[in-house]
Image (cartoon, rainbow, N blue to C red):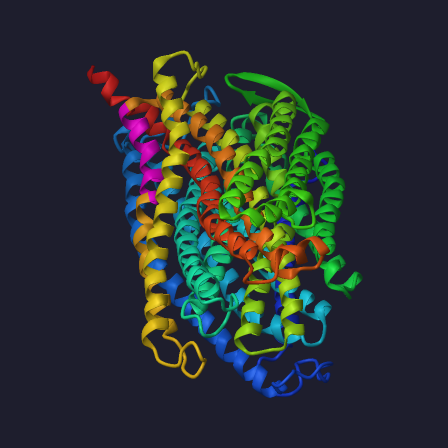
Amino acid sequence: MAVLGEGLTQILIVSSSLIGIVFALIQWFLVSKVKVSGDSENGFHDRLIEEEDGTNNAEASIKCAEIQNAISVGATSFLFTEYKYLSVFTGIFSVIIFLFLGSVKGFSTKSEPCTYNKGNICKPALANAFFSTLAFLLGSITSVLSGFLGMKIATYANARTTLQARRGVGHAFITAFRSGAVMGFLLAANGLLVLFVSISLFKLYYGDDWEGLYESITGYGLGGSSMALFGRVGGGIYTKAADVGADLVGKVERNIPEDDPRNPAVIADNVGDNVGDIAGMGSDLFGSYAESSCAALFVASISSFGISHDYTAMCYPLIISSMGIIVCLITTLFATDLFEIKNVNEIEPSLKRQLLISTILMTAGIAMVSFLALPSEFTLFDFGTEKAVKNWHLFFCVSIGLWAGLVIGYTTEYYTSNAYSPVQDVADSCKTGAATNIIFGLALGYKSVIIPIFAIAVAIYVSFSMAAMYGISVAALGMLSTIATGLAIDAYGPISDNAGGIAEMAGMSSKIRERTDALDAAGNTTAAIGKGFAIGSAALVSLALFGAFVSRAGIKTVDVLTPKVFIGLLVGAMLPYWFSAMTMKSVGSAALKMVEEVRRQFNTIPGLMEGRVKPDYANCVKISTDASLREMIPPGALVLLSPLIAGTFFGVETLAGLLAGSLVSGVQVAISASNTGGAWDNAKKYIEAGVSEHAKSLGPKGSDAHKAAVIGDTVGDPLKDTSGPSLNILIKLMAVESLVFAPFFAAHGGLLFKLL
C-alpha cells in the first residue's frame, strides 16, 4: 500500500492549489505597487532613475495609462463578444453530448453490469450522459476563466512594465515575469482545484463505481479543449489580421516604426497580442492539462487502482500536478528574487534557466511522489490484459515526459532564437530578397521537426514499454507538470511586446525602447518554446486519449491493412492541412480588409502622417473583431464534426484510423509552422537590433534586406500564431471527443456499413 493515506492525499492536493492561488495573488499585489498615473514617483516611493528625453515623467505616465486603457477595453470587448458566441455553442454541444450518450441504452435508468470490473454493477448510461455533460460545462467555464484572467493580468501589467523600464531593464523584467507568473499559477491551481472538487462531488453519486465516475470526468477535458480551439483560432485570426495590416502598410509602404501611434492598426495589433497569445495560450495549455489528467484517470480507473479502490494511487496524476505547483513556486523565486538582471543579454539566459531549474527540481519531486503515493507493485490495464508494473517504472515514465519537454523547448529555442546560426542564416538570406528568405525559413521549419519527433518517439516507447497507455498519459502529465513556470515564461512575451508598443506610442526615449525591445526579443523565443511544449504534450496526450478510446470502444487491434482503418488514416492525415488552409486563408482575408482600411486612413485623413491628428483606432479594432469571430466558426466546425461523422457513419475502426492519421500528420505540420514563423520573426528583429557586425551589414531599418525580412515575418505570422498553435488543439480535441462519445459509437456507430 501507499505511504500517503486518503486524508493526507486530499490535504496535499487542496493545499497545493490554495498555495498556488495565494502565490499568484502576492505576485499580482507586487505588480500593482507600480502605479500608472501622473505622479512623478512610482509605487515604490523611489524617484525614477532616468528622466525622459523631451517627455517628463507625469506626461509619460498619463500617456501610458491612456494607451493601456485602450488596449484593455479592446481586449475585454473582444473576449466578451467571443464568449457570447461560445455560450451558444456550449449550450448546443451540451445537448448533443447528453442525447448521444443517453441513447446508448435507450435513456434507461437501470444499473448495468460494469464493462471492466467484471461481476460488479455500475450506474446507468443515463447517469454517464448527465455527468459527462456537467463535466463538459465545468471544463468549458474553467478554460474560459483561465483565458480571461490571463488577458486581464497582461493588460494590467503592460504599461507597468514600460514605466519600470525607466528604472532599468531588471525592474521591467521582474514586473513582466511576475505578471506572467500570476497567470501561470492561477491557471495551474484553478485547473487542479476544479478537477479535484468535480471528482469529489461526482463521487457522492457514483460511490464505488469508479469506472463510471472517471469515464464521465473525461468531459472536463473536452470542455477545456473546445473553448481553447475557438480561443486560439479566433484570437490568432484577430492578432494576425491586425499585425499583418500594420506591418504591410506601416513598415513596408510608409516606412514608419512598428508601434508608431500614427498607424491606425497599432491598438488592434496590441489588443491581438493579449487575446491570441495570452487568452488563447492559457485556454490551450489548460486544455492539455485537463486532457492528460482525464486520460490518466480513466486508464487508472479500469486498472488495479480503480478496481481495488486505491484512492491515493488513483490520485497520482493530481499529486504530480500538486508537486508541480510547489516546484514552480520555488523556481519563480530564482527569476524574481535570487538573481538580479542587470544587462539586456542576461534576460534570455534567465528565462532558459527557469526551464532547467524547474525540470531538475521536478524530477526529485516526481521521485518523492512515486514512492509515497504508489504501491511498490500493481497491475495496469493493457488492451484487455493486465501488465505488472512497479512504482519506479512510473517515476521513469513521468520523468521522461518531463525531460522530453525540455529537449523540445531547447531545440525550439535553437531554431528560433537569433543568437544561433539557423536564424542568422535566414537573416543573411534576406540580402538577395524576400524569395530566398522564404526558402530558407521553410527549410529551417522542416528541419526543426527532427529532434522533437525523436524526443517524443523515445518518450512514447519507454513509457509504453514500462506502463502501457497509463505510462504515456503520465508522461504527457510530466511534460505539463511545470505548466505554471511554462505559462509564466510564455505570458511574459506578449506583456513585453505590449510594453514596447506603449513606449513607442507614448513617445519615450530610444533608450527605453531598446530595453523593451530586448525584453520582447527574449519573449519571442520563449513564446516559441511555449508552443513547442504545447505541441509536444499534445502528441503524448492525444496518444494516451487514443489508447483510452480504443479500450472504451472495445477495439482489440487497429489494423492499418483493413480498408476501414486505412481510409480513416488517409483522411485524418489530410485534416491538419485542410484546417491550416482554412485558418491561413481567414488571416489573409481579414488582413486584406485591414490593409485597405489602414491605407484609406493614411490617404484620406489630412495630417495623419505628420502626427497632427489621431487615426481611427476603433474601426481597425472592429474589423479584426468581426473577421475573427466570423472566420473562427468553419475551422472549429471541421474539428468538432469530423469525429462525430466518422464514428457515427463509418464506425470505430475508421475513427481510430482518423485519430492516428491526424496525430501523426498534425504534430509535424504544427512544429514546422510554429518554428518557421518564429525564425522569420527573429530574423527581422536580428536585422533591426544590429547588435553584431553581421547584423549591421544587413541593416538598418528600411534597407532592402530589412524589407525582405519584414515580408518573411508577415508570411510567418499566421503560421506561428494561428495555424501552428491551433493544430495541437485539433489533434487533442478530436481524440478526447472520440473518447467521450466512444460508448455511442461502439453501440450505434458505422451506420453506412450496416446499411451496405
The residue sitting at the left extreme is 755
Residue 317 quadrant: top right
Q: Looking at the picture, tell me which residue is in the foreground, 445 or 544.
A: 445
Residue 606 quadrant: bottom left
Prevailing SS of the magenta stretch = helix
Q: Position of residue 740 (x, y in %)?
A: 40, 34
Write the residue at 39% across / 76% down: 615
Residue 491 quadrant: bottom right
Question: Left of 302 or right of it: where is 165?
Answer: right
Q: Looking at the picture, tell me which residue is in the foreground, 339 or 296.
A: 339
Q: Which residues are magenta?
A: 635-649
Which quarter of the image is occupied by the C terminus?
A: top left
Q: Looking at the picture, tell me which residue is in the foreground, 591 or 560.
A: 591
Which quarter of the image is occupied by the N terminus?
A: top right
Q: Looking at the picture, tell me which residue is in the foreground, 627 or 688.
A: 688
Q: Was residue 647 drawn as part of the magenta stretch in this picture?
A: yes
Write the residue at 50% across / 66% down: 152
Compared to residue 383, the image places residue 491 above or below, namely below
Write the residue at 34% across / 72% down: 603
Q: Was residue 668 drawn as part of the magenta stretch in this picture?
A: no
Q: Position of residue 65 (x, y in %)?
A: 52, 79
Compared to residue 278, the image places residue 223 above or below, namely above
Q: Position of residue 373 (x, y in %)?
A: 68, 37
Compared to residue 558, the image places residue 407 above or below, namely below
